[in-house]
Amino acid sequence: MNTIIGLLIIAVGSFGQSSSYVPIKKIRDWAWECFWLVQGIFAWLLFPYLGALMAVPDGQSLFGIIAWAGAPSILKTIGFGMLWGVGGLTFGLSMRYLGIAMGQSIALGTCSAFGTLIPAIIAGENLFEGKGLILLIAVSIAIAGIAIIGYAGALKSQNMTEEERRQAIKDFALKKGLLIALLAGVMSACFNLGLESGVKAQMEGLNVPALFVGLPATLLVTTGGFLVNAAFCIRENLKNKTGKQYFSVSGNVLTNNVLFCALAGLLWYSQFFGKSVGESFFDKDSVILLFSWSILMSLNILFSNVWGIILKEWKGAGKKSVTFLAAGLLILILSIIFTGVSQQ
C-alpha cells in the first residue's frame, strides 16, 4: 500500500512538470531568453528554497543543515547541478524544435536511462544479478518504449506537410531537435547524480523529516542549474538586445508574464517535490527506490504526450504514428508495473 501511495505522489508531481510548458504559451511580447530566465527564478530558486525550508528541523536553519554536509559534498552537488543546467537549457530548446510530446520523450528517455543506471553502478550494484538485474531489465523496457515513441515521432514528421508541422510547432526542425534532445537527456541525468552525491545522505542524520529529506539537495542542484541558465539568458539578452523587454511591456502584460512564469515554475518544481515525498514511502533497499528516477521520467513522457495530443501536435500524423505512440506509452507503463511486481 505504501508503494502505491508513493507512486501516486510521484505521478501528481510528474503531471505538474508535464504541464509546466503550457503556461509559457500564454506569455506575450517576451523573447525566449526573457521568459526562460524569469520562469527559472521561480522554478530553480524560489520554489526549491521554499521546499527546502520544510526540511529544516525545529531550532535549526536551512543553511546550517546544508553546511553540515561539508564543502566537498555541497560543491559536488552544485557542480552536477551546473551540468544539469546545460541539459535544462537544451531541454527547453528541444521543446522549441520538436514540440512538447516528441521533445520531452527523447530528452527524458535518455535522461531516464543515464540517471538511473549510473548512480546504481556508483553505489556498487551488480546489474547482472539480483536487484541490479531487475533494475537493468526495467530500464531496458522503459528505453524500448521511449525508442518506439521516438519512431512514432519520425513517422509523424514524414506524414505531415511542412505547413502542418509549422502550425503544430512553429520552429519545427527534426535533425536539430533530435541532437539537442539527446544532449539534453545526457546532461539532465546529472540532476539525479547531484541528488545522490552525498548531501541527501547527510540530511538523514540530522532529524530531517523523512518526507522532505531530499529537498535541500534539490535546492543545491537547481541553484547550480540556474547559474548556467541565467548566464546564457543574460548573454542572449545582450546579444539580441532583448533585455529591455522585461520592463518595456505594459503593466498588464508584465503582470500576465510574471504570473504565468511563476505558475510554470511551480508546476516544474512539483516533480522533484513529489519525488522526494513519494520516495519516503518506498523501502530503503527496494528496487523501486532505485528505479524512482526512471519512474519519474517515464511518467513525464506519458503526461507530456497527453498534452501533445490535447494541443494537437499529433494532428495529421496518421494512424500508424499514433499506434506506435500508444504502444510506446503502454510499454513505459509496463516498465513501472514490472518494477512494482518484482517487489512482491
Image (cartoon, rainbow, N blue to C red):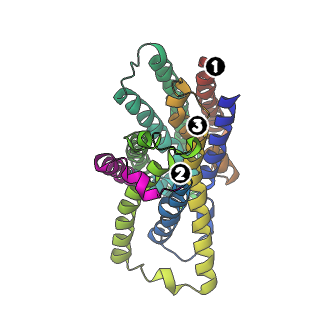
Tell which tag, 1 or 2, sits nearer the viewer.
Answer: 2
Say which of 157 and 19 sits in front: 19
- Residue 32, placed above or below residue 175: below
Identify the secondary structure beneath mark 3. loop
Disc 3 residue crowd, few under 14, some 14–19, many 20+, Cα 10 Å: some
Residue placed at 54% from the left, 24% from the top? 286
Q: Is residue 38 visible?
A: yes
Q: Is residue 316 visible?
A: no
Q: Which residue is mark 1?
A: 341
> Could you give the CA–CA distance between mark 3 and mark 2, rounded to whole angstroms?
17 Å
**Where, quadrant-wise, is the C terminus in this rendering?**
top right
Magenta region, residue range: 59-85
Residue 77 counted in the magenta span: yes
Q: Position of residue 249 (x, y in %)?
A: 55, 84
Circle on res. 57: 2
Residues at discs 1 and 2 in contact (Cβ within 8 Å): no
Kindly identify the amino acid type of the residue bearing the numbered disc 1.
Val
- Residue 110, placed above or below residue 220: above
Identify the secondary structure beneath mark 2. loop
Which of the two labelled residues, at mark 1 and mark 2, occupies the earlier sequence position?
2
Residue 92 counted in the magenta span: no
